[in-house]
């Protein structure tokens, strides 16, 4: 029992941030799984974070209620962005979304009445790990249901080959627009979760570091299944802590090297449904059949 | 009037740095399809290597520039061969290389932080040209002339290389479709190495010159250049050297004039407002043309 308490005292912060980063990574996965590489999640997170912070500040809402508002606000922001971005070709969209991250920071800095400007904002409420876990469980359940739905199927088709998908009568635009809406809602919730975990947000909270954490978590964990980003977020969040225990002087370098090695060895990420399927098909029952 | 002209030259020099840096970023993106977030780290490291060459071996400034440029190019080749090459055959698209480039960004930046003790250094004042060219009606620092000259030389050279030579044709072919280019007899590996080296070398040149001109050599040097160089690439269009250079200079001039005549708080804001406007109004950049590739 004492060991569990010790573990909790030492690592509860890491677990909380792992949960928060899971939301952000899932938001990135939502668009990625429809074939869109986009950093816009950072902007949705900023919208969600500041909306939640303002709501909590003004109406003293409990965190989970504020999460709902943040999700709606993120979704609305995503709808606007999607209309602009879906006109762009893939390469341009990646560049444009990165530019949007830079623009978000400037906007946050220059609207002090909404965001506190340079000073940033204090968030008076702290979300508990249990609440974060519950919110993530609900979100993950939604992703699980989506994975096995019409939407999950067509989004995989659009990702693999948009031309073939549209030949089959799938509207690429519609699928990617829905993907953006989901990304916006989950990103908004993630931003609010980050705000209520850090209890202080500023323009630098939602900036390049978050963009890189997000994309690295998603791809590290595996961007072909909804469980991948969650695994990736926990691994990527725990890396610095682990490295600090092992190699305190060069913990950042070690973190980069681990990321590099995992990506080179497992370019499809830690959770890869294709590998699982191959392994299942090699089980004794089917072992005698020749490879298809 | 004198102030106006001097600020104009200031802006062009600053913009030349952005353009010089952006050329390599755009070249790698267009030819190799890699969104290289570690591009700024080449500039930081080139400046740091140049600084060490000056301080330890007491070399002259041109030698320091050469050392920095070659260092940047070699570093870029190393990053490419370690981080990007293993992913090329596995069809991970833009994603895999993006993540390994983030890994290198983390590694190279923290190593650069250690190498400089997280401080900002400057070239010793006797080691680089500090004088001014006196034209009578205005004075221009030699460093700014060197920066503008270097940018014009590199931009013209790379533009001609890409548009007029066989190697350039091979680079464009690999950028369009690497497999088809290989089938057509293009040595893709040579193109990859050359592109990586050119990108690292121009980034390194921007790093050394920028580090000398602003007396700021630190692990943060590359990040500043990356943000502005990136803006230049988006505004100018990533597949055209001319656009990147023009957009870089435009950004530089705007920044200097806004800081001079309006307010320094709008300085960065304006860059990104310009960026947003271009993204919405003209998403393919200044010289961007239609894309004939089907989805």
Image: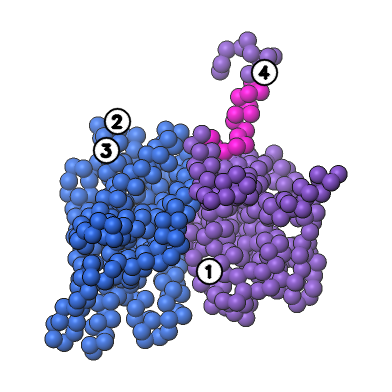
Mark 3 or mark 2: name the one nearer the start of the chain: 2
Rendered shade, chain B: blue
Query: How many C-alpha atoms fall within 10 Å of the one at disc 2: few (<14), some, or many (≥20)?
Result: few
Q: Residue at x 19, y 55 (%)?
A: B157
Q: Residue at x 60, y 49 (%)?
A: A244
Query: Going by the picture, which residue comes out furthest to the right?
Result: A1
Please report the bounds of the magenta region as a residue range.
A266-281
Labels 2 and 1 share a subunit: no
Q: Which disc is residue A105 wearing?
A: 1
Q: CA distance from mark 4 to mark 1?
A: 52 Å
Residue A61 is left or right of residue A74, and the answer is right
- Asked whether the residues under the numbered discs 4 and 2 touch, taking CB atoms below 8 Å apart as contact, a structural biologist would say no
Q: CA distance from mark 2 to mark 1?
A: 45 Å
Task: Point out the frontmost of discs 4 and 2.
Answer: 4
- The subunit letter for the residue under badge 4 reads A
**Would you identify the image quadrant in which residue A209 lies?**
bottom right
Q: Is residue B286 magenta?
A: no
Q: Which disc is residue B190 wearing?
A: 3
Q: Nearer the viewer, residue A259 or B60?
A: B60
Mark 4 or mark 1: name the one nearer the start of the chain: 1
Instruction: State the residue position of label 4.
Output: A283
Q: Secondary structure at mark 1?
A: helix
Q: Is residue A271 magenta?
A: yes
**x and y, in percent, of residue A271 in the image:** 62, 36
Task: Point out the frontmost of discs 3 and 2.
Answer: 3
Q: Which quarter of the figure is the C terminus of chain A placed in?
A: top right
Q: CA distance from mark 4 to mark 3?
A: 44 Å
Q: Residue at x 67, y 18 (%)?
A: A283
Q: Which disc is residue B183 wearing?
A: 2
Labels 4 and 3 share a subunit: no
């Amino acid at each position: 029992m004492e060991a569990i308490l010790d573990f909790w005292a030492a690592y509860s912060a890491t677990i909380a941030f792992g949960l928060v980063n899971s939301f952000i990574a899932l938001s990135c996965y939502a668009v990625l799984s429809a074939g869109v590489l986009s950093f816009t999640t950072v902007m949705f997170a900023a919208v969600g974070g500041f909306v939640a912070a303002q709501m909590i500040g003004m109406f003293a809402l409990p965190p989970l209620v504020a999460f709902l508002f943040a999700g709606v606000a993120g979704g609305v922001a995503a709808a606007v962005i999607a209309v602009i971005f879906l006109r762009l070709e893939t390469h341009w969209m990646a560049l444009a979304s990165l530019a949007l991250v830079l623009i978000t920071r400037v906007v946050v800095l220059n609207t002090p009445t909404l965001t506190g400007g340079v000073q940033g904002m204090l968030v008076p409420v702290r979300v508990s790990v249990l609440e974060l876990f519950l919110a993530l469980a609900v979100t993950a359940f939604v992703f699980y249901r989506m994975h096995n739905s019409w939407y999950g199927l067509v989004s995989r088709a659009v990702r693999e080959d948009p031309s073939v998908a549209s030949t089959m009568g799938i509207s690429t635009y519609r699928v990617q627009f829905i993907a953006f809406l989901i990304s916006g809602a989950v990103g908004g919730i993630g931003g609010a979760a980050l705000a209520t975990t850090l209890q202080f947000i500023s323009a630098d909270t939602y900036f390049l570091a978050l963009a890189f954490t997000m994309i690295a978590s998603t791809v590290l964990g595996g961007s072909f299944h909804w469980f991948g980003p969650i695994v990736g977020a926990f691994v990527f969040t725990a890396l610095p802590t682990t490295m600090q225990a092992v190699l305190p002087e060069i913990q950042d370098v070690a973190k980069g090297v681990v990321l590099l090695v995992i990506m080179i060895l497992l370019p499809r990420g830690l959770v890869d449904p294709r590998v699982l399927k191959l392994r299942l098909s090699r089980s004794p029952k089917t072992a005698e059949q020749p490879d298809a | 009037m004198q102030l106006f002209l001097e600020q104009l030259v200031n802006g062009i020099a600053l913009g030349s740095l952005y353009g010089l840096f952006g050329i390599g970023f755009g070249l790698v993106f267009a030819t190799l399809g890699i969104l290289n977030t570690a591009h700024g780290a080449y500039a930081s490291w080139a400046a740091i290597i140049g600084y060490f060459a000056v301080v330890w071996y007491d070399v002259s400034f041109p030698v320091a520039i050469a050392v920095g440029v070659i260092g940047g190019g070699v570093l870029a080749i190393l990053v490419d061969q370690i981080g990007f090459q293993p992913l090329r055959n596995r069809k991970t698209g833009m994603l895999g290389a993006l993540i390994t480039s983030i890994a290198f960004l983390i590694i190279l930046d923290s190593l650069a932080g250690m190498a400089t003790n997280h401080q900002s250094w400057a070239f010793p004042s006797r080691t680089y040209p500090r004088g001014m060219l006196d034209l009578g009606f205005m004075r221009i620092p030699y460093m700014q002339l060197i920066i503008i000259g270097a940018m014009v030389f590199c931009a013209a050279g790379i533009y001609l290389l890409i548009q007029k030579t066989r190697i350039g044709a091979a680079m464009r072919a690999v950028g369009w479709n690497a497999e088809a280019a290989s089938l057509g007899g293009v040595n893709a590996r040579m193109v990859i190495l050359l592109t990586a080296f050119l990108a690292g070398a121009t980034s390194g040149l921007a790093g050394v010159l920028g580090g000398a001109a602003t007396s700021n050599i630190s692990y943060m040097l590359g990040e500043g250049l990356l943000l502005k160089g990136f803006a230049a690439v988006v505004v100018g269009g990533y597949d055209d050297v001319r656009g990147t250079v023009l957009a870089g200079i435009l950004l530089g001039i705007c920044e200097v004039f806004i800081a001079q005549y309006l307010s320094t708080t709008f300085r960065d804001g304006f860059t990104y407002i310009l960026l947003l406007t271009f993204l919405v109004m003209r998403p393919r950049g200044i010289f961007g043309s239609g894309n004939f590739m089907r989805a």
